[in-house]
Every structure is written in C-alpha cells, then in structure tokens.
Image: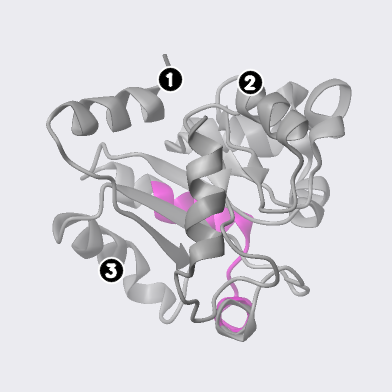
Amino acid sequence: MSFISEYIKKKNNHGEKILSIFLTSGCPDKNNFSQLALDIMEAGADMLEIGFPFSDPLADGPTIQHSSYIALQNGINIKTTFSFVEEIRKKSDKPIILMGYANPVLNYGIKNFANDAANCGVNGIIIPDVPLEEYANFFYDAFDKLEVILLATPTTSEERIKKIDELSQGFLYYVSMTGTTGKQVSHDEEILNSLKKLQN
C-alpha cells in the first residue's frame, strides 16, 4: 500500500475524514510561502497539493489562473517549488502532492522532474492533461518513486473509471463537476449521484 493511501486509511480507521488543501506555489508571497503551508497543515490540513504555475492553465477557472499569474510574476518555477517542498518537509511528514500541467514537466525533463521531486520529499503527482493512454511507455514510466494520482470526471465512462482506478495510486482524484475548477459550485443531486456511482 502506498504512503498516501496508508495515511488516508489510518485516518479513516479512526473515523476521521481527510482535508486536502490546494495552494499555488509562491502565491501570494514567495518569501513566506513555506511558512503559510506549514501553518495550514498545523491548522488541520491532512495533505497539501502544491500547484506549480503555468502560463496557460486552461483547465482552471479565474481564481486559480490568477494565482498562477501571481506566482509567475513572483519568479516561481519548478525549482523554486521543489525548494519550498524541502523547507516544508523539514517540519512536516504529511503527504505533499504536486499538481500542474505537462508542459513545464516536459520542459524540465520528465526523468529529472521525477527524480528531483522524489528527492525533495514529494509523495505524489497530479498532471490533469496527461491522459490514461500515456500512463505507460511515455510520461509516467519515470515516476517510480512518486505516486501517480489520476483523474476521473462525471463524463468519464464506467469502463474507463475502472481502468483509472486500477492505475491510480494514493487515491483517485474525482472532479465532481464539468468545466473549469476554482469556482463556486452547488452540491446538487446530479453531483451527489455521480459520487455514489463512483463507490460501486
């Protein structure tokens, strides 16, 4: 069992739910980002998702797009994100997951990214724009030291969800709504039904 899934299981066995918080790396202030992350974990976050910024975050809504813009203006890139993780890791052993788009990873070098991420203390990786078909033989082959977390959505077929579930490590990331992320959403019956279907 993976570190992340074991962590979740232990919490669940004690009747606790998991709170995962997303932060864009180096936003709003690169000088106190590591301390902000530690404060959030100390306040009760169980896991931290750190988004490394990208100039064209098309799957995200205005809020996360703006945070990515601020991070880029602050000079944040993958290397500075790794340095933040190193600082956070000195004081916390809670799961840290990096989340971002494929282009910066390709530019950094897939193997270099995978090795440097693991060495600085990252546990898992979420890259929304890398499809299931590229899980093996290309993109994720190098990620043997990281837990690769895959995504499913309400429009994902049942057969495809099963394949994603088989390959996803740590947990399966279910995007409960269609469209961009980072906007207010009402928990209507359709969303609740899609979540119930996922449990089967």
Label 2, residues with CA under 10 Å away: few <14, some 14-19, many ≥20: few
Q: Which residue is mark 2?
A: 166
Residue 32: give x, y in percent of width and height: 32, 73
Earlier in the chain: of badge 2 and badge 3, it is: 3
Helix, strand or loop: magenta stretch = helix
* Secondary structure of the residue carrying numbered label 1: loop
Label 1, residues with CA under 10 Å away: few <14, some 14-19, many ≥20: some
Q: Nearer the viewer, residue 44 or 82?
A: 44
Q: Which mark is residue 2?
A: 1
- The residue drawn where x is 66% and y is 45% is 152
* Secondary structure of the residue carrying numbered label 3: helix
Residue 17: give x, y in percent of width and height: 24, 44
- Which residues make up the magenta segment? 67-85
Name the quadrant containing residue 21. Answer: bottom left
Residue type at mark 3 is Leu
- The residue drawn where x is 63% and y is 19% is 144
Label 3, residues with CA under 10 Å away: few <14, some 14-19, many ≥20: some
Earlier in the chain: of badge 1 and badge 2, it is: 1
Q: Which mark is residue 36?
A: 3
* Secondary structure of the residue carrying numbered label 2: helix
